[in-house]
Amino acid sequence: MQSESLQIGVIGAGSWGTSVARLLFNNGSIVHLWCYETETKQDILTNHLNSSFLPDIRLPESIGASNDLSEVVRNCRILVVSVPSHFSREIAKKMRSEISDKHILVILSKGIEQHSLALMSEIFTNELDNLPKLAVLSGPTFAREVALDLPSAGVLACADEETGSMLQKFFIQIVSVFTVAQ
């Protein structure tokens, strides 16, 4: 089921990024997963597994994988960021030249930046010149449970009600959406 054929890029192929890529694909999206490690990319493309992070979870054959961050950002309107918090600023800087206000950025990365104490949303807001619409997904979710299609709960927060409603259908198994007036 590939409704609307919307292309979503998942930035980060750890256990959480891989689980969410699988969820998004199963909910009808065309998914491109950006992998830092070449071995992870090859494993996903060849074996349809992410042996390093979710070794026993089979991935759909149609999930794409790439080591080219610019390509994923350029080709996907929705970008889901799932990198360790200490890499968030570096990733934001690398995305800067390709991102526009037509993108929607969903941040899954948890925590704060150690030296600045900035939230992940603050890092991306500060680093991106053409700020896209921004949403943050958080809550008591576990990558393995999401990958196994077990019940999960989370909150997708964003300032724009239309964006929140649109994103909700892609994350439907794990989220409630709240919008906040700025």
Image: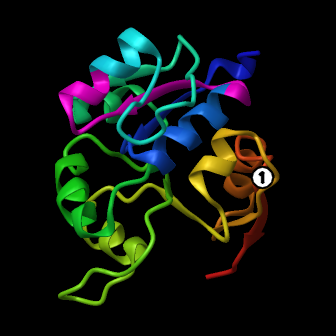
* Residue ID at (30%, 73%): 123
Depth check: 147 or 89 in front? 147
Q: Is residue 39 visible?
A: yes
* Residue ID at (19%, 27%): 38
Horizontal and vertical percent position of residue 58: 57, 23
Is 57 on the left or on the right of 86, as rendered?
Answer: right
Q: Quadrant of the N terminus?
A: top right
Residue position marked by numbered label 1 in the rendering? 165
The vertical placement of 28 against 163, above or below, is above
Secondary element type, mark 1: helix
For this orientation, the residue located farthest to the front is 56
Q: Quadrant of residue 181?
A: bottom right
Depth check: 160 or 83 in front? 83
**Number of numbered discs on residues:** 1
* Residue ID at (38%, 72%): 120
Q: Amino acid at mark 1?
A: Ser
Is 59 on the left or on the right of 102, as rendered?
Answer: right
> What range is drawn magenta here?
26-41
Is 86 on the left or on the right of 111, as rendered?
Answer: left
Q: Is residue 103 visible?
A: no
Q: Is residue 68 magenta?
A: no
Horizontal and vertical percent position of residue 130: 32, 55
Q: Quadrant of the C terminus?
A: bottom right
The vertical placement of 182 against 45, above or below, is below
* Residue ID at (70%, 27%): 26
Horizontal and vertical percent position of residue 128: 28, 60
Horizontal and vertical percent position of residue 166: 73, 46
